[in-house]
Every structure is written in structure tokens, then in C-alpha cells.
Image (spheres, coloured by chain):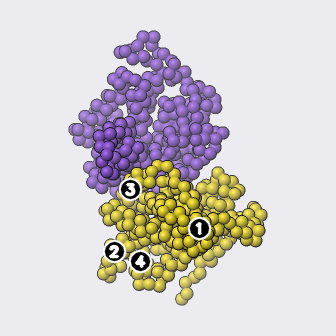
Chain colours: A yellow, B purple
Amino acid sequence: MKPRIDWPGRLLLPLFMLAALPFMSPSTWLTLTVAGAAMGMMLFLMASGLTLIFGLMDVITFAHGAFISLGAYTATAVVAALPGMAASQGWAAALAVLALALMAAILAAGLVGYVFEVVIIRRVYGSHLRQILITVGGLIVAQELLVAVFGANPIPVVKPLAMQGSVELFGATIEVFRLVAVALGVAVFAGLQLVLQRTRLGLTVRAGVENIEMVEALGFRVKRLFVLVFVTGCALAGVGGVMWGLYQGLVTTAIGPEMMILVFIILIMGGMGSVTGAFVAAILVGLATNYTSFLAPRLALGSSILLMVAVLLWRPRGLFSGGR
Amino acid sequence: MRLDAILSGDRPRGRVLTVVLILAVLALAGAPFLFPGTKALGVASRICIFIVLAASYDIVLGYTGIVSFAHAMFFGIGAYGVAIALSGLGPSWGAVLLGLGGALLVSAVLATIIGFVSLRLRALYFSMVTLAVASFALIMATQAREITGGEDGLTFSVPRLLSPGFRLLAEPLFGVRVDGRVITYYMVFAVAVVMFLAMLRVVNSPFGRVLQAIRENEFRAQALGYSLLLHRTLAGVIGALAATVAGAMLALVLRYNGPAASMSFEIMVDGILLMTVVGGMGTLYGPMIGAILIVLAQYQLQPALAGLSAQITGWPVLPMLVNPDRWLLWLGVLFVVIVYFFPKGLAGRR
């Protein structure tokens, strides 16, 4: 028997976009929709790792924001180290700078994530209360260390030249960098899905999300899987941090923790542990933030919270929850 | 015994703890005369206020085992209630009561809604939802300039009895001028004592026992017929109301309120959470010790680090880490170490 297709869940996103159309002109709508999708993609990068970590390890970490900040700071360092390439015309140089920044962030966040897992997370498996407390402590320490290394002053960072500016599309102005963010987000989503659905490793991870004891009983080394997923999650947060830092143009230590609020809303809305859920919810939050920023700027975060409450009333376990 | 009636039969455990607590209460009771000076009085009032705040947080964290990030929001609501009423209506006791009453109502409604929406699902969601709601409240408080004074906050006059210019006695008492500041301090002290004893009463009531049962074994408590949702939400509301009162006290002491003074995440994490965890969750005496230690540390750690970093200038890396601005780093390390090695805190339940 074929599983029933979840039409309401699939149609939610297009319907949400359409619902905003009557409140603004079509060109504004297009600009905001692309901006929302871009923001959603960057949010997805930050949230995807966390949802996997939670789904597989049953670990909730509040320190994820530090890895976002770390990614953003890495981006400032890489761009500052390559002034010639960042300022030169042409896409090849711009993409090279971005790729280098992403790789540096993946390395940095992955490495720190590994240490974090071994030193801090491993000892608090199984107790949400202690996980929350210890990761909040870890967040304070990580933030302070970032300040100690990079200084307390905000660091400005310029996007590579080719990714600055905007293009006209159907009368709407669209920033080039947003398109880059959308492309990267879609690529990461596709890559994650490919690994999760088509490889043996992904199969093990998905099985672990369903029933970790069974996977362990079958002889898989679950601890290794945990480390791998945690490090991947942190690296993804670093990638999100690079994009968000470049997008904002100004990097502070608060840049990560600020985003965590939206990331948590996305996790709850999408269903904790579901990558697809995080993807859809991230775009929803991105769109809601951008639409409301246009209509009523002060209520931007409020709109995301309302959206979350509405989703929870409709589907208490989130849009695309797995077994949990 | 009469003492047991006052403390609701819940005495601090351990001789050292008891002695320390008695000394602390005596020191606080005589603070204006033992430690004269405006700054010392400010520290003492802050300790009293944060004892109430941390203890009220413990009702949520220590007695029901759920982590709320919205406690500073309720603290802020109390402070803003009094601040808005006093700056709008002028310095009168009626305005204080009106502000406090309004703030209590807002807190109760908010805490009920947060509890019913998020606790209906999983206790874990509660932490994330409270984080989101608290940051939204902080944004609203900083943006609604007409009402809250925005980033700058509100400065206002307090009723005449509490204002620094008021003299209760013509002659100094034990060499200390008994002015509005001292009266404010004793009001705060009295409120703190009453609130603390009231909270002790709550956690040792049959209701408090149910909370502990839920904390120890959710499933069994549920099987015995107690509603998790109802009890946890009610605990959240009680904690929120106590925090609101503490916030109102803060506003009266400072004669000022702004987002950084009462509502910020620094207050939440570096203050309330740290105090409760360091002191020890699950007995109200733990947060009391925690509040005293952390408030003192906040005033002492920076000068201490400054002294230390002056000693070791020229060393590699280290000066960067003991820079006085990095005092939070050390509190964070302390926090992690305590959660690891002393999960019960300094005075937590055995």
C-alpha cells in the first residue's frame, strides 16, 4: 500500500505565499518572497543540523548559536585575508572567496563541535534538563571566548563584489546574494536528503531517529554516529553563520544566539527531528518575517511566534514529525 | 514548634548551611547600620530582590524540572508596571498598587497561556517557547518608546516616604541617617521575608508535594491521577507572580527601569539561572545562597580580575582571559563545572 500523501502539509507553503499577495503590489511581493526564501534557506542551514542532532541523539543544545557566530566570524577573517579576490570583478573570484569561507567555517565549527561533543555533550546524554543547563553555560563560555579572540567590537564584512548589487526581475528588485543563498540552501537540502535516503549511512541515521536502541542492539556503533551527526550539525551551523554574516554585513557575538530564537521556532514547527519539516518551516518563518517586516515592522518576531502557535494547534507534533 | 510553623517545617539541611543562612539573614536585617553607604545599601537591596527572584524561579526549575527562559520577562513586567504607573500618574501609593496589580494580572495571563500552549505538548518545548516569547517581549519593551521609554527606560519619582530626601528621624540612629533609602530597604527586606516564607509554604503544601512527585517520576504522578499540565502551569504562574513582585521592588529601589535593568537575557541567564543552579535547585535555600553569592560576585569579580590581570601583564594569552571584561567567562565556567560535578549545587536537595 502506498503511504497517503500529506497534501495539507505540502500545500501549506504555496498557500501561505498566495495569502500575502493581496496585501501588497506584485513586484513588492516578489521581492519579499525571494528575500523570505533566502532568509529561510539560511535559517534552514542553521536548523537542519540541530534537528538531526535532536532526532538522532535526543540532545537539545542551546549552544548552537555559538557555532553560527563562529561561522560568521570565520567569514570576516577569510574575506579580510583575501582583499584582492573579494574586491575583484567576476564570479570566479567571488565564488572562490565564498567557497573558502565556507570551508574554513566547516573546519572551524566542525572541530569546535567535536570538542564540544566530547567534553560537554557526551556526559549529559539522556537528561534534557542537564543538557539545557550545561549548553547554556557552554554558550556563555563560547561567546566570551569569541569576544576574547575577535574583540568586542562589531566587525564589518563586505560581500564578494560579484555578489553585491541586485537584478531586476519582472519589475522586482532582487539582491544577488539572496539568490546565492537560495541556491546554497537548496543544494544543502538536496545533499542531505540524498545522503539520508540513498546511502547506508543515511539509512542508519534514519533508523536511529526511529529507534536508537534497536540500531545499537544490531551492533552499530551508535556513539560514532552521534559524534558524526553532531559535528555535521555544527558545521552546518557554521555554513549558515557564514551566509548570515555576509548577508548582514556586520558581525557581532550576538549574531548567532539572536538567530537561535527563530531556529527553535522552526524546530518546533517543522517537527523535531525532521529535515523536510525544518526546510518547510524555515521558509515559512523567513517569509512571515519578511512579509510582516514590510506590513508591521515591530511585529516581525511576533508573526513567527503566532505562526508556531497556529501550527501547534493544528499539528501538535509539528508539520512533518517523525516518530517522536 | 513555632519556628517550624514559620518555615513550614522545611528547615535548611546541614549545620554549616543553617549557620551561613542565619548569618546572612542577620546581616541583611542590619545592613543599613552594619554596612553604611549608598552602594552597600544598593547591594543589600539587590540581594533581597534576587533572593525572591531566584527562589521563585526554583519553583519552576527545581520543583517541576522544566527550564523557563521567560522568568526575567515576568521580573521586567513587574518593574515596568510600577515604572509606567509612577511616571504616568505621579508618585503616589495608589499608583504603585495599580502598577503592581496590573503587572500581576498581565503576568498571570501570560504565564497561563505559555503553560497551556507549550506544556500540552512536551516539557522540552516549554524552554524554546519561553525563549521566543521572552525575546518578543524584550523587543516590544525596547520599541514601544511612548510607553516604556525604549532603550533609555523610565526614570520616575517614588512616593515621598521612599524618596531619598525624606527624613524619618531628626537625629541619626547609630550614626546612620534614617532617610527614604533606608525605609525603602526595610520595605524590600520585609517583602522579601514574607515572599520567601510564602513560597516555602507553597512548596511544602500538598500542591508542592505533587510538583515534586512530577519531577521525580512524571509517569507515576500521572498514573496517580495528577494532571501534569495543570500542576506545571500553576507552578509557572506562581513563579511568575513572585517574580513580578520582585520586579516591582527593583523599580522602587532604582527609581528607574529599562530593558537592561530588569528584562534582558543577561538578567535571565547570568542572573536568575546561574543563581538557582549554583545555589542548588530543589530547595528554596539553595537559590537564596546562590543569589547572595552571585550578586556579591558581580560586584567583586571584576575588581578581582583587574587586580589579577595587572599582576600578569606580559604573559601570553592569559591576560586576555583574565581581562576584567571577561568576568562572565569565569561565571560560565563555574556554571558548567557545577552542572557537571555538583548537580545539586551548594545547598541542593540530597
The amino acid marked with disc number 1 is Ser
For residue B51, which numbered disc appears in the image? none
Pick the front one: A46 or A282: A46
Residue hosting label 1:
A88
Secondary structure category for the residue under label 4: helix
Secondary structure category for the residue under label 3: helix
Q: How many numbered discs sit on the rendered protein?
A: 4
Q: Residue at x 54, y 36 (%)?
A: B257
Answer few, some or many: residues within 10 Å of disc 3's Cα (few below 14, many 20 plus, some between 14 and 19): many
- Which one is closest to the eye, mark 3 or mark 4? 3
Answer few, some or many: residues within 10 Å of disc 1's Cα (few below 14, many 20 plus, some between 14 and 19): some
Q: Are marks 3 and 1 on the same chain?
A: yes
Secondary structure category for the residue under label 1: loop
Q: Is residue A267 left or right of residue A12?
A: left
Q: CA distance from mark 3 to mark 4?
A: 26 Å
Q: Chain of mark 1?
A: A
The amino acid marked with disc number 3 is Gly
Q: Is residue B214 visible?
A: no
**Where does the N terminus of chain A fall, quadrant-wise?**
bottom right
Spot occupied by residue A208 in the image (x, y as percentages of width and height): 40, 76
Q: Residue at x 47, y 56 (%)?
A: B127
N-term-proximal mark, 3 vs 1 = 1
